[in-house]
Structures are given as C-alpha cells and as structure tokens.
Amino acid sequence: MARREIGPVPYEAFRQRVRRHRRTDVILAVAALNSYLERVNFGLAPAVRFPNFVNPFSLGGVARTALISGKDHRGQPVEHQDLVEMCSYYANLAEPELENESGPEWLRNAATRMAYEQSGYQLSAMENIGRTLPLPVSYTPLTLPTINSV
C-alpha cells in the first residue's frame, strides 16, 4: 500500500474525520490504544510498530475533538486504521495563527502550544506516583473538639 502524503489539514477536516464515528466508540478506542501503548512502554505487551504520529498527544487531540464535536448516532465502527488516520490528521493540523506571526512572538506562541500539550508527559511515571505518596502518609484524621454538656 502506497503511503499518501498529507499536507496541512484544516481543523474542520480533522473534526469531520473524527465525527464519522460514534463518540463513545472513538473514546473507547483511544483509551484502549493509549493503554496498550503504556503497557508496551513498561514491557507488559508485545511491541507493535505504529507511525510516530500515533502518540499520547495526538490521541488526546482525537479524544478532545470526539468529546466536543462527536455524536453517538453515527454508525461507522472505529477500526485500527481509522485511529491512525485521525492521529495523522491531528499531527498535520494547520495553525493559521502561527503562520501569520514571525520572530520572538511566533516562537513564544509555538512553545506555549507545545508545552501545553506535552507538559504532562515530561515527568516519569515514578515522579507522578511519587507526588501522590505523601497524601496517605501525611493525612491526619479530622478531630472535632468535644463539647462537654453542663
């Protein structure tokens, strides 16, 4: 199968691509694939080669679009290739506001967008787990003062 090149995709085309399927099916498929990718990262599942644009960022973009714009009365099922194509659309979204800028302003806006999408994935799993550890350890039960009756 020949690989087709995709250029900048308008958001509306991406939105329509996601809307072909039931919202619930898209969300469940994204959750399943993201879970599988995490299991692969921890060596708990066999690795399958995906294109580099199938990642947590693009899956998050697909899920957000499904939640915002999707409908549950669609009939087309979500196949593996559909998710790959939706991620491809997301990775190639046109950014008209960034095309019209230049210089330091462009760099600041581009970096802000990337940091927003990727900041949650910059920490390792152990750092994320470690942040929650003090919660049960330092928790002290609420004690109410007793009121003595006279």
Image (cartoon, grey):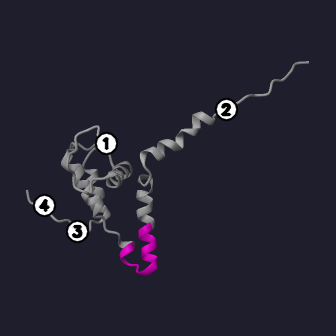
Measured Cα–Cα span from mark 1 to mark 3? 29 Å
Q: Which mark is residue 7?
A: 3
Look at the numbered disc 1 and give the secondary structure of its residue.
loop
Amino acid carrying label 2: it is Thr
Please rate how many residues cluster around mark 2, counting C-alpha atoms within 10 Å: few if below 14, some from 14 to 19, many from 20.
few
**Seen from this angle, which residue lies furthest bottom?**
103
Measured Cα–Cα span from mark 1 to mark 2? 45 Å
Measured Cα–Cα span from mark 3 to mark 2? 56 Å
Query: Which badge, 1 or 2, comes first in the chain's sequence?
Result: 1
* Mark 1 in CB contact with mark 2 (< 8 angstroms): no
User: Which corner quadrant holds the C terminus?
Assistant: top right
Q: Residue 3 carries which label?
A: 4
Give the image quarter of residue 39. top left
Amino acid carrying label 1: it is Asp
- Label 2 sits on residue: 140
User: Mark 1 or mark 3, which is nearer to you?
Assistant: 3
